[in-house]
Image (spheres, grey):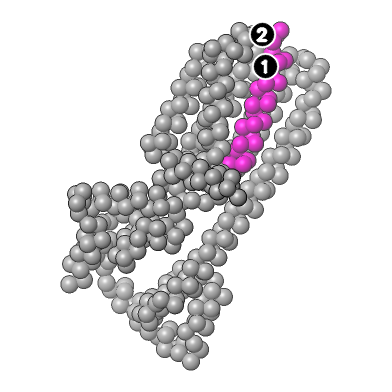
């Protein structure tokens, strides 16, 4: 139990350090874990080859290796400074590894006939690992590209070298890669569907739980938003049952009237801060409601560090000084806009 708690704490610290603008969920954690593993693996391999620990024969194409490593490192730095998204950084890094290994295979078939067999086997292992990483990171399109590139590159090496061993293994490897790619992408589709369903269930659960603390006015807002956001009929019916059948007709009429009034009223917060993202706008609404960072993180299903980062961006958008109170500023904006 203690070991599991320690692992969870380490996992949370890693997440807080490397991700600020990411929603904390299984897919993003999986991608971050794979990306960090990939960075460690490539860095270790480059270091071992550069210092000569893997033998002099593995020092071929050293300038190209350095160039790829510079691009790889630049991508990682761009991710750390929030210049590119995690999925983009991971896709680019895996793509660089795939391109490098394919070029190594093709080059050695032409230039190193006494060494190409060992290098092709090593490159195929790396390409298989990259395919596995792409599938585990739920990068569906990239996995198809890797599988096709791997089969074509290996087929070219078989034709160019004429090696009986490579030719005999071509059909088996092509079949294995094809099956793994198809099954892996099927799992990706199923996971995306499960993620969507899980998100809908969480939203419905939080909505129903929040009804106990709602005023009648808040209930009317919720019912109208439910209709406008295309909630499933079952979800809307559940909300109506909580209010009571005898008052459903009155509630619907009141909700329609409320929505007509809402259409004629401009949001002062939107007017004052038109560039706020939907997430930042939602955070502002919760801050106005008096919610703390931990409460906002729970309600929005995000990490507290993510909410803190978004608060910093909101303060920058409002041009607040260090001592200015964010909630008081937002309340003042709303007050001015409604008077």
Residue picked out by circle 2: 112
Q: Is residue 276 above or below residue 206?
A: above
Q: Residue at x 78, y 15 (%)?
A: 163
Please give left or right for residue 117 compared with residue 252 in the image: right
* For the residues bearing labels 2 and 1, Cβ distance under 8 angstroms: yes
**Badge 1: residue crowd in 10 Å (few <14, some 14–19, many ≥20):** some
Q: Give residue 119's mark.
A: 1
Q: Is residue 152 visible?
A: no
Please give left or right for residue 247 compared with residue 158 in the image: left
Please give left or right for residue 298 compared with residue 100 in the image: left
Q: Nearer the viewer, residue 332 or 177?
A: 332
Quarter of the C terminus within the rendering: bottom left
Q: Nearer the viewer, residue 323 or 282?
A: 323
Q: Is residue 27 above or below residue 76?
A: below
From the top left corner, tell me how far across and down residue 70 is, in percent.
45, 22
What's the magenta region? 112-138
Magenta stretch: includes residue 118: yes
Compute the Cα span from label 2 to label 1: 10 Å
From the top left corner, tell me how far across and down residue 132 is, in percent.
65, 36
Secondary structure predominantly adopted by residues drawn in magenta: helix
Q: Give residue 231's mark.
A: none
């Amino acid at each position: 139990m203690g070991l599991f708690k320690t692992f969870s704490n380490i996992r949370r610290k890693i997440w807080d350090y490397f991700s600020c603008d990411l929603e904390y969920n299984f897919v993003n954690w999986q991608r971050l874990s794979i990306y960090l593993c990939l960075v460690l693996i490539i860095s270790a391999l480059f270091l071992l080859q550069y210092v000569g620990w893997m033998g002099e024969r593995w020092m071929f194409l050293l300038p190209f290796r350095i160039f790829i490593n510079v691009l790889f490192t630049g991508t990682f730095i761009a991710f750390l400074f929030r210049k590119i998204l995690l999925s983009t950084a991971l896709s680019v890094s895996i793509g660089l590894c795939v391109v490098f290994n394919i070029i190594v295979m093709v080059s050695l078939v032409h230039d190193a006939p006494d060494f190409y067999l060992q290098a092709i086997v090593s490159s195929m292992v790396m390409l298989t690992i990259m395919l596995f990483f792409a599938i585990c990171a739920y990068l569906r399109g990239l996995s198809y590209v890797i599988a096709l590139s791997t089969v074509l590159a290996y087929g070219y090496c078989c034709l160019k070298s004429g090696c009986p061993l490579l030719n005999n293994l071509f059909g088996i490897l092509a079949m294995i890669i094809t099956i793994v790619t198809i099954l892996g992408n099927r799992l990706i589709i199923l996971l995306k569907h499960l993620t969507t369903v899980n998100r809908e269930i969480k939203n419905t659960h939080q909505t129903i739980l929040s009804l106990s603390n709602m005023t009648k006015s808040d209930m009317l807002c919720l019912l109208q938003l439910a209709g406008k956001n295309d909630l499933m009929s079952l979800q809307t019916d559940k909300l109506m049952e909580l209010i009571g059948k005898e008052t459903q007709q009155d509630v619907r009429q009141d909700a329609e009237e409320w929505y007509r009034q809402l259409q004629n009223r401009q949001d002062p917060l939107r007017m004052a801060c038109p560039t706020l993202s939907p997430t930042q706008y939602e955070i502002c609404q919760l801050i106005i409601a008096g919610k703390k960072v931990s409460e906002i993180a729970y309600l929005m299903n995000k990490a507290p560090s993510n909410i803190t980062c978004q608060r910093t961006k909101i303060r920058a958008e409002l041009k607040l000084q260090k001592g200015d109170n964010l909630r008081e500023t937002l309340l003042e904006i709303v007050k001015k806009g409604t008077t």
